Image: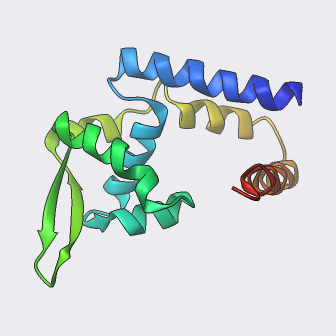
Amino acid sequence: MQKVWALAHALDVRSKRMARTIGVTGPQRLVLRLIGEMPGATAGMLARSLDLHASTLTGVLSRLEARRLITRRVDPEDRRRVRFSLTAAGRRIDRERSGTVEAAVRRALSRVSDQKASASEEVMAILVEELLRDL
């Protein structure tokens, strides 16, 4: 349990540092990275990639749009659907590689075997499942 809490704390600390150094929190950066990989993605597409409910992303997407890091446009084929793309400022943050959560994760994964990394991913998925059970 102590390691789980330590991981949650470390993610929070890194996220706050990212906000100061590159201008976005860890979750905001993750959403920017996904939009960079999937230009024109809908909130539903992003939510499925993150294994979250679309409503969970509403605040993150609104903050990114307010800061002019992403744009939203109505899907011409289905006017109920909105599609997101990065602005030039969003692309700059998407390209940033140092001081990010994923840079720390890459360094950590380089220190363990593929087998251990795979086992760790499985354990984390099970932990998430159990933590969200009955909510």
Q: Residue 112 is drawn in which quadrant?
A: top right
Name the foreground residue: 90 vs 1: 1
Residue extending farthest to the front is 134
Q: Where residue 42 sits: x, y (%)? A: 31, 67
55, 90: nearer the viewer = 55
Q: Nearer the viewer, residue 28 or 98?
A: 28
| Residue 11 % position (x, y) | 62, 27
Residue occupying image coordinates x 73% and y 40% = 109
Coordinates of residue 15 in the picture (x, y in percent): 51, 25
Q: Is residue 3 above or below residue 62?
A: above
Q: In percent of the image, x 21 and y 40: which residue is there?
A: 69
Instruction: Find residue 89 and report its image quarter.
Output: top left
**Relative vertical location of residue 95 with respect to residue 17 in this rendering, above or below:** below
Give left or right: position of 50 versus 125. Answer: left
- Please say whether residue 91 is visible from this viewpoint: no
Numbered marks: total: 0
